[in-house]
Each structure stands twice: as structure tokens, then as C-alpha cells.
Amino acid sequence: MKEVNFSISLIFFWLKGSVGVDSRFVKTNLSNTILGFIPLGKDQQNIPLKNISGSILSSKYLAKPILIGIILLFIGFGMMADSFFGGLVLLLIGVGIALSGIQTILVIEKAGSPYFIKVPFFEKAKMNQLNDYIHEALSEDTDKTDLNMFFDKKAQDQ
């Protein structure tokens, strides 16, 4: 089984998720959260490879968190003269919120409905690797049932 572990939150990087791909299933194990940072249980799914038609990797920029983060960033800069520590804290929170608005999303199309795995932008390489694992497993699954390929390979072996 090929497995990828990743962080599901930028600010609370200790919240982890994992997705494993084998010849029969895509197994997800993600942390559920309230408000994006309070852990509340797990979301575990075993998606049969036969039910997956494909996967897509995309980037998404969420305007609301980016704007709120930029506003907090400027307020933090303004507070630096009065209270350095308070301004610094607000500045860091603003940067965290703004950067959390940049997401990488892996969409797994399963039985006609999309299944979204949203991660921070710095986990894009891991999501790309996971997308490759899913495509590889799908192509191997298709090759197993292709009789033309089977007979061509059998003819080459003789």
C-alpha cells in the first residue's frame, strides 16, 4: 500500500490526515474539525477503486480569509507602536489566516460524486504524489481487465 501523510491545517499543523492507495481501495483517514482548528473525530472511508473514475488536483484562493488576514496584518502593524507584543500576535494571526486562504484540493470522483481533500498550499507536492498513485492504480486496474493487452503480452512471451 502506498500511503501519503499530510497536514490538513496551516495554523494547526499537528492535525494530520493520511490517504493510502492499494490495488483495490483508496483509504482515507482525515481529522474532522470545527471552525477549521478544533479537532472533532475522524472521517475514514474505504473507496473501492472500481467506483473511482478519476482524480483532479487544483489550487483555490479563498478571498474571505485572505482579506481578513490582510486586514488583521495591517491592524497588527498599526498596534506595534502602542503594544509591540499585541501587535506582533495580531500580525502573526493575520499572516496565518491569509495563508490559510490558499488551498490545494484533491478531488476524487467516486460514483459520480466528488470527494474533496483540502490541504494547505505547502502540501501540494504530497497531493500531487497522491494523485499520481491514484492514476497509477486506476491504470493498473484497467490493464488487468483488458483482454487485448493480455493476449498481446502472451504472444510476446512465446
Image: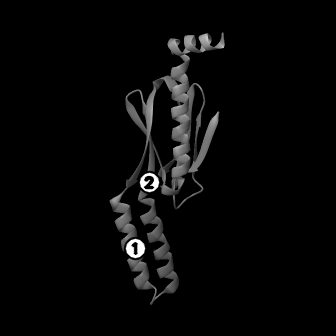
Report the residue at 45% width, 63% height from top.
99
Q: 50 or 138, which is in the foreground?
A: 138
**According to the image, label 2 marks what residue?**
103
Looking at the rendered structure, the kind of residue marked 1 is: Leu
List x then y, in percent, for residue 145: 52, 15
- Quarter holding the N terminus is top right
The answer for how far apart the CA atoms under marks 1 and 2 are is 20 Å
Task: Report if residue 93 is visible in the image.
Answer: yes
Colour basis: one colour
- Graded by Cα atoms within 10 Å as few (under 14), some (14 to 19) or many (20 or more), the crowding at tag 1 reads many
Q: Is residue 124 above or below residue 64?
A: above
Task: Report if residue 41 is visible in the image.
Answer: no
Q: 24 or 128, which is in the foreground?
A: 128
Looking at the rendered structure, the kind of residue marked 2 is: Gln
List x then y, in percent, for residue 28: 55, 37
Q: Nearer the viewer, mark 1 or mark 2?
A: 2
For residue 77, side relative to residue 47 (left or right): left
Report the residue at 56% width, 25% height from top.
140
List x then y, in percent, for residue 18: 58, 43
**According to the image, label 1 marks what residue?**
72
The numbered disc on residue 86 is none
Q: Is residue 101 above or below residue 151?
A: below
Q: 139 or 124, which is in the foreground?
A: 139
User: On the image, which quarter does residue 141 sit in?
Assistant: top right
